[in-house]
Image (cartoon, rainbow, N blue to C red):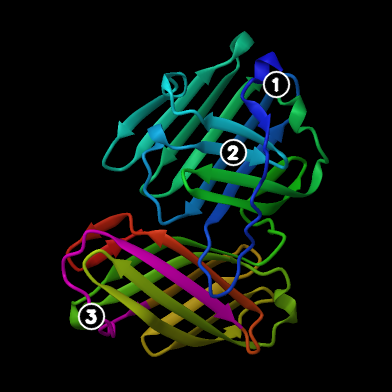
Amino acid sequence: MKLWACLVIAGSVVLALSQPCRAQNSVYYRLFKLKPTQRGKLKAKFYYNSVEFPDILSSIVTLSFNEYTYVFNQTNDISDMFYWRRRSKLNGIYRYQRWMDKGGRVKMLINARKQWGTVDMKGVNLLALSTNRTGIHSLGLQISGMQKTERVKLVGYKHAGPMPYETNFFFVDGLTMRYNKGPADMLLIRFIAKYNAPQSLPNTVPATFVVDGQGQVSSFSGLTFTVPMTRQTKVSFAGQSGPVRTMVNFKTGKGVMVYKKQALPITLAPMQTNMVFTVRATFGAPVVFDEQTAFRAGYVRPNYFRY
């Protein structure tokens, strides 16, 4: 345990499964690899949706695997902050590096504005993480007040994007919005939508997206886009209705919704200081997929947002 002093049993892990009509934090693991040995390795790359833009130097940061949690910053005193370096205050980029006994080391990189991070542990005692090599496991992340645990399928201690989550899952990977430009208005949403039974869907599936925006200057709500999608393959659907087109592949989870060449039916001040978006996606009639997430815009310019 001396080599793994910062590995502690989490007192409680919040399993916040996605609920319709209520925005939830989301964490999407593009990569997770584990070697639970005396000189173990753990690599992870994650993306998350959160309305927060915290100062990592004064925030709790933890990564958990099942019932165990590695605490990157718990007490916020000089002993924790010694391992952190702020690379960019404007973009919220922070780097953590700690050398352990006998040459082990732990690294973490967080981009708080674009909401992604990487973890790289090498030569560290990870025997406490030994578990079944194949199955559904809990991967948790906490950054300040953002705390979420996802149930992810691992095969041989490895996970990659195309592999399924245990339940329906919705994550916004990117959003670009141009407004007050008339026919040049545009809204593009790239997302991950995991639904593990796409073969059971009919050949025509309506897709509805509802977008709300809460800014410090002005806001909008109930911006709705509905598109009838038709089956392209066993696992993918696509469709277009007027200025809106959408596509989703339920096996990989990748999807996109694009609105362009028509003015957005909203009223927003041209200058904003920030914007928190909430996006809800529903598929099917009756609805079989109904998930929602919220996040903070990362890039704000006149008549323009990007996340």
Q: Quadrant of the N terminus?
A: top right
Q: Earlier in the sequence, mark 2 or mark 3?
A: 2
Helix, strand or loop for disc 1? loop
Q: Which residue was labeled with disc 1?
A: 125
Q: Quadrant of the C terminus?
A: bottom left
Q: Position of residue 26 (x, y in %)?
A: 54, 57
Image coordinates of residue 158 in percent, x first then y, are 70, 42
Q: How many marks?
A: 3
Disc number for residue 63: 2
Q: Residue furthest right?
A: 132
Residue at x 66% of width, y 54% of height: 15
Image position, residue 146 (x, y; %):
49, 50
Q: Residues within 10 Å of mark 3 (few under 14, many from 20)?
A: few
Residue 169 rendering spot, x and y as whole percentages = 61, 64
Q: Check disc 3 and give the amino acid type.
A: Thr
Residue 106 vs residue 246, the one in the foreground:
106
Magenta residue span: 259-283
Q: Residues within 10 Å of mark 1 (few under 14, many from 20)?
A: many
Determine whether, in the image, residue 69 is placed left or right of residue 245.
Answer: right
Could you classify mark 2 by the number of other residues whose Cα lies within 10 Å: few (under 14), some (14-19), or many (20 or more)? Answer: some
Q: CA distance from mark 1 to mark 3?
A: 55 Å
